[in-house]
Amino acid sequence: MQLALVDNQRVEAFTGGRGTCPTCLSTMIAKCGTRVINHWAHYKKRECDPWWENETQWHRDWKNLFPIECREVNHVAHDGEVHRADIKTPTGIVIEIQHSSITDIERKAREDFYKNLVWVVDGKSFQANFDIYHMLPDPQSEVAQDIVWSKAQRHMQGSNNGIFFRLSEAKEVYPELNITKENLQFGLIHSFQEIKTEIEKSYNGYHQYDWIRPRKTWIEAQCPVYIDFGDEFLVKLENYDASNLHCIRLVAKQKFIHDVMIKKHVHEIASRFYPLSNEK
Ligand SMILES: [Zn+2]
């Protein structure tokens, strides 16, 4: 842990330090040295918070982006169950900074416990399995309403560059069928290039992607998931539209950090339309 109580102040570990765990109130000793990041450890092995994972530098860097009073905050449920959130903002948003993989059961337990929770997942270990492909128009935009995209997949050159069907065309050919985005599977094949300008105009960070051997628990998560691959954009997992296309959205890390401090609910993070530059 980064913080323990010393003289009733939450402080960082210092050489020779002794303190108290703010969650279970047992004794903690400071671990400082060149081989580990400075941290506090429980003096005796004991059941404190079973959800807590050992901190990496990545965890610490994320916590340090927030004021000290937002880090390692106890959260108490109505029934008295206590857990320590990695980050809890002044508006009540909880951010869990997750490096290790996690079971569905634990993921769900934490979502039920914190409710207004957003996940930030360390993507470094699976980055080579995660491809980001062509831009998608903002799903709310006019151009997106008539389009059903073919899912991008590694080695599927056509889909990776963007191919789609038009809902209006399929309806015209088969007026007797009730064709919707959910069931549209045929039609004239169109390419990204035909509507490139329109897409660029309504671009708001959405892209096709493919995740080889995905960590399914993150795709199925109820709370928003942002993957951190170590650059200035976080990769948010999203469901694009009624066609059930899984997509990602690039959200500037700065925007995320700004919004979690002022928005009340996790679904309001980066919710406004912010046209981005078209670099990626
Ligand atoms: Zn403890």
Image (tube, rainbow, N blue to C red):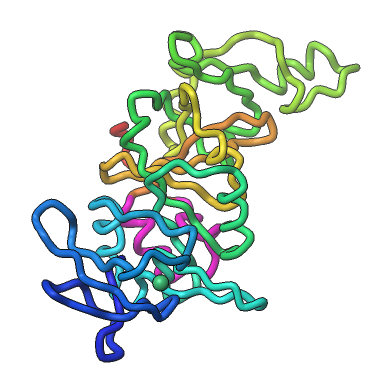
Residue 254 is a magenta residue: yes
Picture layout, residue 237 above or below residue 97: above
Rendered-image quadrant of the N terminus: bottom left
In front of the other: 123 or 138:
123
Q: Is residue 29 left or right of residue 80?
A: left
Q: Residue furthest front?
A: 44
Answer with the quarter of the image where residue 113 lies: bottom right
Residue 236 is a magenta residue: no
Provide the residue span drawn in magenta. Answer: 253-273
Q: What x and y, as percent, mark residue 8? A: 30, 90
Rendered-image quadrant of the C terminus: top left
Q: Main secondary structure of the magenta part?
A: helix
Residue at screen point 44% across, 14% down? 154
Picture layout, residue 41 above or below residue 148: below
Q: Is residue 151 visible?
A: yes
Q: Is residue 204 visible?
A: no
Q: What x and y, as percent, mark residue 20? A: 32, 80
Ligand 1 lies in quarter: bottom left
Q: Residue furthest bottom?
A: 7
